[in-house]
Image (spheres, rainbow, N blue to C red):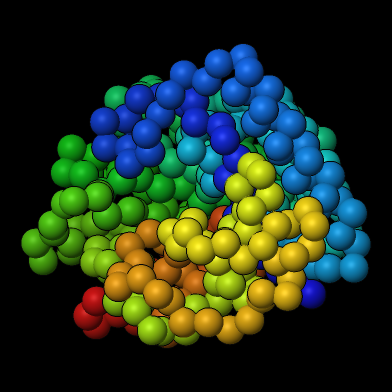
Amino acid sequence: MDLTILYRGPLASCDYDCPYCPFAKRRDSRAQLTADRSALERFAGWASEQTGDRLSLLFTPWGEGLVRSWYRRALAELSRLPHVRRVAIQTNLSGRTQWLDEADPDTIALWCTFHPGQTPYDRFLAKCRDLAERGIRHSVGVVGLPEHLEQARRLRDDLPDHVYLWVNAAEGHTYTDAEAARWTALDPLFPYSRHPHRSAGLPCRTGESVVSVDGEGMVRRCHFVREELGNLYDGSYRAALRPRACPLAVCDCHIGYVHLETLPLYDVFAGGVLERIPAAPPPGRTPLRLLTPASS
């Protein structure tokens, strides 16, 4: 079986405190960190044993995972397994990058977000250039708030040409056509993020070839649908995998709507769905623009 898993354990602490972050952050206690480490190691152990399947793994922690040694170690070890097609994580890139020396660069990937006001621009850019020099697949993005626009333009100019710069529509923010055009000039795929996508009753790969897993091993079709499909560790989820329509009215998060079968994003991101890297090279951008939606 080819299976994509989005893993989110109990970790909720972050070294940043972005005012626009939709995640409720806490300062994890030692006991909470121990529980997160145990949950992650259990998941990584399970994944390492699934040699009869082909796995693609995306870690989407509430907090920042790569400042924790157990995330760095798990990603490096998983990347070296022949049955793991891709292992990626969402990160603010605040942590050190030397651990990547232990990872397989053909399998590991990072989904990096720049948060102006939380880290010096030059420091973040240096980390991105370090990833490029190491040959690590990565995308880089920002939240599309007006106060971020000039920094985003600077970032696009300073990043290596092959690195895709994505822009997420800010939660609760409505974009005029003129504002959207400015962001689309940086990210031709921004129109997909600008408006929520109607999803009710539409076919989606989640629940069939894509699932989400929490720290206790409970399997759901995605992070946004609470119905449980079974448990990862007793194998009960496998009987529940089948094509199914989305039960929600809309989907407004990239890690959700990228899997909608009514959108062409599996073609746009062919080979880079988990790490948000489009198949077409970013510098030309015209091929991507032709694929953006005419309306939401």
Can you give x and y, in whole percent of width and height, for residue 269 in the image? 53, 70
Q: Quadrant of the N terminus?
A: bottom right
Question: Which residue is rendered at x = 71% and y = 38% of the image?
Answer: 40
Question: Which residue is rendered at x = 42% and y = 69% of the image?
Answer: 257
Can you give x and y, in whole percent of width and height, for residue 208 in the image? 62, 76
Task: State how many labels appear.
Answer: 0
Q: Quadrant of residue 207?
A: bottom right
Question: Which residue is rendered at x = 50% and y = 72% of the image?
Answer: 259
Q: In which quarter of the image is the C terminus?
A: bottom left
Seen from the viewer's position, the closer of residues 225 and 143 is: 225
Question: Which residue is rendered at x = 66% and y = 74% of the image?
Answer: 240
Residue 137 appearing in the image: no
Q: Tell me: residue 186, above or below residue 153.
A: below
Seen from the viewer's position, the closer of residues 12 and 90 is: 12
Q: Quadrant of residue 117?
A: top left
Can you give x and y, in whole percent of width and height, for residue 194 in the image? 24, 63
Q: Tell me: residue 10, above or below residue 287.
A: above
Q: In which quarter of the image is residue 25?
A: top left
Residue 176 appearing in the image: yes
Seen from the viewer's position, the closer of residues 201 and 160 is: 201
Can you give x and y, in whole percent of width and height, for residue 231 in the image? 70, 57
Q: Is residue 194 left or right of residue 108?
A: left
Seen from the viewer's position, the closer of residues 31 and 6 is: 31
Q: Tell me: residue 91, above or below residue 30.
A: below
